[in-house]
Image (cartoon, rainbow, N blue to C red):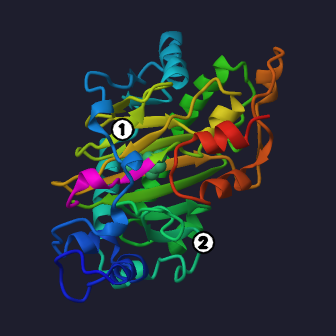
Amino acid sequence: PTIFVAMPSILVNSRDITNFVVKEGHGVKGLAEMGLESLPEQYIQPPEGRMDTSIIVPEESVPVIDMSHWHDPKVADLICDAAEKWGFFQIVNHGVPIEVLKDVKDASHRFFNLPAEEKRKLLKENSPTNNVRFGTSFIPEAEKALEWKDYLSLFYVTDDEAAAFWPPVCKNQTLEFIQSSDLVVKKLLRVLMKRLNVTEIKESLLMGSKRINLNYYPICPNPELTVGVGRHSDVSTLTIPLQDDIGGLYVRKKVSDSWIHVSPISGSLVINIGDALQIMSNGRYKSVEHRVVANGRKNRISVPIFVTPKPTDVIGPLSEVLESGETPKYKQVLYSDYVKHFFRKGHDGKENRICKDMTA
Ligand code: OGA
Ligand code: NI
């Protein structure tokens, strides 16, 4: 095996590094903290996977919407227009207390600062439950190049289940964030459904399950050669990707190859439409590709909540949407099958999944 990077002698080859990061639970955070001088080869993305800075449009931003008067038809229009045209927007005056946001971000740092021996207990092969998982990259066993990110993923079932299994250092804060965002999610979905002429409340279908991820993107040597998260759309109904003040999340501008930075706004929440809502709205609302770049100077965290159907739900274009005679663009699919499909291979955008495999 080739020696390609100056680092402590215990990690001399590629296999050692993968073991250390993936199997031993040190994550890329552990690797970054050893002070390596250059990016290990398994993190080097092929050129098409990297962020080419010439395709960033610096003067544009996604809409920022004040939710204080969400009943106002003008505000409702802004929300629905943003969901149709951008698939991404930010909301202010959303009703989730700033303290809750601060607490969950602090809790994320506490979790990642745990020793590797603690985090290792939550790796897929060790975790006492499928609903709690610590990991690194996206699917290390299937990806061509690894992503510069560690994560804790928590699938919410009940408060009792969370009390029993979620890590004590972040359990209350993550639960609090999920609970206090519930109302604004309901408001957004109500407004979005109204434009589709859906009057029946479909909360159990639209938001029957929730997952919260804690993401950690450590300082990276050669950030331009790798990614934090590769380009993808979310499989959710809606996502609330809470971010800190570091920046680095980029959104694809619809039908173009240009990318727009989602600038951190203190106290705001980012909202993005996921594939499930694109499917249910028969393509009216758009899930949009996004990616996170690696950062050479600062550690970044994010805490997305994924609001989703239940794994056992069958999703497809809603009957109310098709009533006007619209032809269905997508097939019906068991939601858990759709998600499984997403986790089959590395991040490669959305066209293979929703555009090709789901077309009716
Ligand atoms: C995701 C995601 C964005 C971020 O986890 O699906 O897009 O800012 N995260 O971490
Ligand atoms: Ni995402």
The image quadrant of residue 357 is: top right
Instruction: Judge left or right: residue 334 versus residue 162.
Output: right
Q: Earlier in the sequence, mark 2 or mark 1?
A: 2
Residue name at image x 76 percent, y 54 percent: 312
Residue 95, visible in the rendered structure:
no
Single out the residue that lies furthest toward the bottom: 10
Q: Closer to the observer: label 2 or label 1?
A: 1
Q: Which residue is mark 1?
A: 250
Dot 1, crowdedness within 10 Å: few (<14), some or many (≥20)?
A: many
Range shown magenta: 220-230
Spatial CA span between label 2 and label 1: 30 Å
Q: Which residue is mark 2?
A: 130
The reply to whether the magenta stretch includes residue 219 is no
Query: Compared to 337, does 284 lie above or below?
Result: above
The kind of residue tagged 1 is Tyr
Q: Element at badge 1?
A: strand
